Image (spheres, rainbow, N blue to C red):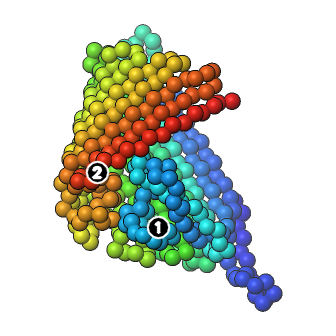
Amino acid sequence: MTGRNLRSFRPELILGETNRRSLLGRLDYGLQLWNGALRSNTLFNVNSGQEPKIEYIFQRVERGQGEYFLINPTENPNLSNIQDFRYDPSNPLSEYIRLTLFNNEFIRTQNSEINQNIRIEAVRFFKDQKQNQKKSSWQKWVSRISGLSNIRMSKRRMDNATGGFGGFFNFDFRDTALVAYNALLNNSLFFNRGNVLYDIQLTNQQTRNRTARVNGYEDRENQEYLLRARLNVKRKADVFITAASGTTRYEVEIFPERNLDIRYYRINPEVSYRPSQTTRIILKYIHTDKYQQILTKDNASIRDVTIETSWRKASGFSLDQSFSWVNIRFTGLPNSPIEYDMLEGLKNGTNFLWTFTYTKRLAGNIDMTLNYEGRKTGILPPVHVGRMQVRATF
């Protein structure tokens, strides 16, 4: 760790330089306890730098080749208004890509990053137990428990902000001096992980990020609690049940009427059947309820029934197909930004989506892929998109 306190006695000699404190350093700490039952790694970085003010512009491409969808189509859309575009690469109607414009506007920052990983494997607690000594019932139960926790946070804070050296260690998202912020918190608890017959997983995931742009900040946050269970039936089928609850938030400084705070609940039973080593059939049902908790306070109820099939032959070809029936009840206005965000590009009423992908090995290092996608959303006419690709691997 290196600390520096810069004092400028004659600022007129070095334009832009002011009194400031900075810190440069790195801490990497690894820990292993109880025969590896608990393993931890901590990485902490601090430095100083500059953060550019980001400006985006959207370029129109062929329909189906883009990654962004324009939610308010007009004859002359504002291609720099990021609030009118949504990232949706799976949508065959996406026809825009996002380009970054470089500029000379920078913010001097103090940067901090922390990455913490903790892994728990309860079975290792009993590693020293004698081989001829049987485990008790509670030991067998505890041995099936494992856990994984990952915390990764990075922030860039205004260099002239108050707080001194203590600001490098403060990762509070509510800090008014934040310029950029990225955080991922993922905590998972497993029971019987890797077992052939069944397993259970409980997960909490949270992501947050802030981006500094020319016209103000942009904040995004997602938080989800998920419970997933799997049961194997006669080696050829797996039954899954997944339940999730979470929130999706979006806040932008210049267009507050586009802010989101969506609460959702989801239940997802699924059956995966393998009649042979080369064939798989998946049938799943997803029921989702969504509630916009601010502004219009719209809500949506989504029922999705999907069947997927795959057929593969080693070093020969693969064939994947899927068909989805999606029924939606939505209380908001059609063709509005909140409709696209809550319905993920679909429409109120009955929707149909289907895909067909065929991949053929033409030679030892050449593959050909044929892809066909279609969708029928609400009362709109169906849309068909076809693609062909030849890929060579060297």
Q: What element carries label 1?
A: helix
306 left or right of 12 in image: left
Above or below, 62 against 136 in this view is below
Q: Residue at x 23, y 66 (%)?
A: 333
Above or below, 116 against 11 in this view is above
Q: How far across and down, in percent of the image, does residue 215 sit?
A: 51, 76
Q: Do the residues labelled 1 and 2 touch (CB within 8 Å)?
A: no
Q: How far across and down, in percent of the image, does residue 35 sit?
A: 52, 28
Q: Mark 2 points at which residue?
A: 381
Which quarter of the rendered picture does the N terminus lie within?
Answer: bottom right
Which quarter of the rendered picture does the C terminus lie within?
Answer: top right
Asked whether 122 or 283 is in front, the reply is 283
First of labels 1, 2 by sequence position: 1
Q: For the view shown, which residue lies furthest in the top direction?
A: 132
Circle 2 Cα neighbour tier, 10 Å, few/some/many (<14 / 14–19 / ≥20): few
Circle 1 Cα neighbour tier, 10 Å, few/some/many (<14 / 14–19 / ≥20): some
